[in-house]
Each structure stands twice: as structure tokens, then as C-alpha cells.
Amino acid sequence: MYFETIKCEDFEVFNLNYHNKRVAKTIGKNLNLQEYINPISDELLRCKVIYDENEIISVDYFPYKKREIKSFKLIYENDINYSKKYLNREKIDELFLKKESCDEIIIVKNGVVRDTSIANIAIFYDGYWIVSKNSLLEGTTKTRLLEEKNLVEKDISVEMLKKAEKIALLNSMIGFDIINEFEISD
């Protein structure tokens, strides 16, 4: 099973086209998520759509409050695959538990910075924003910003990450969230 996390606010559903594209890529057929999503209030909501190859299983809404993230623990893990937005996040949850006193983790696979537990990551380095060419998951916000030519896609080394002037987390709920002051621990 798979899921999509979709931002809803003021009864508006955000970036649905990108979520529909990812669902189609995941299961090999089109599902129009708009037919299933009806926000329950005007507040900021996280809509969670669970589906499989055949159907939409459930649509749930949760009030959303953004987490404050300022510190990151580097987690080196070569044995991880999250190429589709699987409902089973056991491996990512297991890695997240290794964050120690940090707010979030950054997963490094085969020497390349990939993602955090909840978002793609971009760095401001040498005057432009770079997003990992080999993210664990192709996020909808990453895809949109690449299409809009707001990001450059290339491999991010740990050295580049540590020298970055600022970083940004990208996901459907927070958009492109720039973090100017951050700490990274090994």
C-alpha cells in the first residue's frame, strides 16, 4: 500500500496535479484524487490518502502544525529503498530513532545526501539551490520546483552539506522551507 500527503487550507487542495502524477507513476494508472478529497474545514489540514494498485482505501484529515527543525543527525545507511511513497515506513522510522538529541535526520546513502525522514533536502551552495539528484523519494514539491527551474539537481556530498550557507526542507505541507541557522552532527 501507498499514501499521499496533501496540503489543504481554506477548502483548497494544493498541488493536486503533482500528486496525481506520482500516484499514476506508482501504480501505473490514473486516479483523480480530486474525486476523493473534500476538506472538512478551512484550517490547515494534512490530508492522508491511502491507496493500492486497485483503489483508494481511505482519506483522512488531520490538523497540521509544522515541526521546528534546527538540528540534524547524519545517518549513513546504504540498505534503504523508498522509491515509492510506501505506507510501510518502518525502515525510515527505525533510522529516525537514531537522531539522538537532534530534531531530524539526514539520510546519506553511498556517500550521497538523500533526504530527511519527512522531506527532500536542498542546500544553498556556491550561489544556487541544489537538490539531491538521487533523493530516496521524488517529492511533489521537488518536482514542481525543478519544473519551475528554481532548483539545480545534482549529487550532494556530506562536505557540500556541511559547507552550505543554508538548507531547505521540501515537502507538500511545508513547501520550500528555508532554514538559515542549523546544526549538523555526525
Image (cartoon, rainbow, N blue to C red):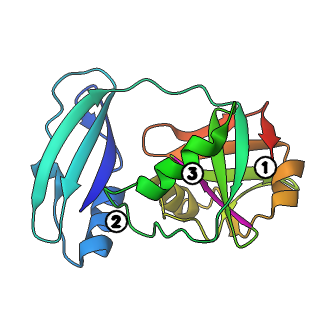
Nearer to me, 55 or 166: 55
Inter-mark Cα distance, 1 to 3: 25 Å
**Chief secondary structure of the magenta portion:** strand
Q: Secondary structure at mark 3?
A: helix
Up-down relation of residue 83 to residue 115 (above or below): below
Q: Quadrant of residue 100?
A: top right
Up-down relation of residue 4 to residue 69 (above or below): below
Residue 133: mark in rendering:
none
Image position, residue 113 (x, y; %): 70, 61
Inter-mark Cα distance, 1 to 2: 26 Å
Name the amino acid type tagged 2: Arg
Q: Secondary structure at mark 2?
A: helix
Residue 95: mark in rendering:
3
What residue is shown at x 36% (from left), y 59% (from top)?
18
Nearer to me, 138 or 81: 81
Instruction: Tell whether 93 sits left or right of 108.
Output: left
Neighbor class of circle 1 (other Cα within 10 Å; few <14, some 14-19, many 20+) is many
Residue 152 belongs to the span the image colors magenta: no
Residue 116 belongs to the span the image colors magenta: yes
Instruction: Tell whether 127 sits left or right of 23.
Output: right
Image position, residue 56 (x, y; %): 12, 57
Task: Please identify the quadrant where the N terminus is shown.
Answer: bottom left
Name the amino acid type tagged 1: Phe
Q: Quadrant of residue 79?
A: bottom right
On the image, numbered disc 1 is attached to which residue? 124
On the image, numbered disc 2 is attached to which residue? 22
Inter-mark Cα distance, 2 to 3: 25 Å
Front label number (1 vs 3):
3
Of the two numbered discs 1 and 3 on the same chain, state the one appearing first in sequence.
3
Q: Secondary structure at mark 1?
A: strand
Of the two numbered discs 2 and 3 on the same chain, state the one appearing first in sequence.
2
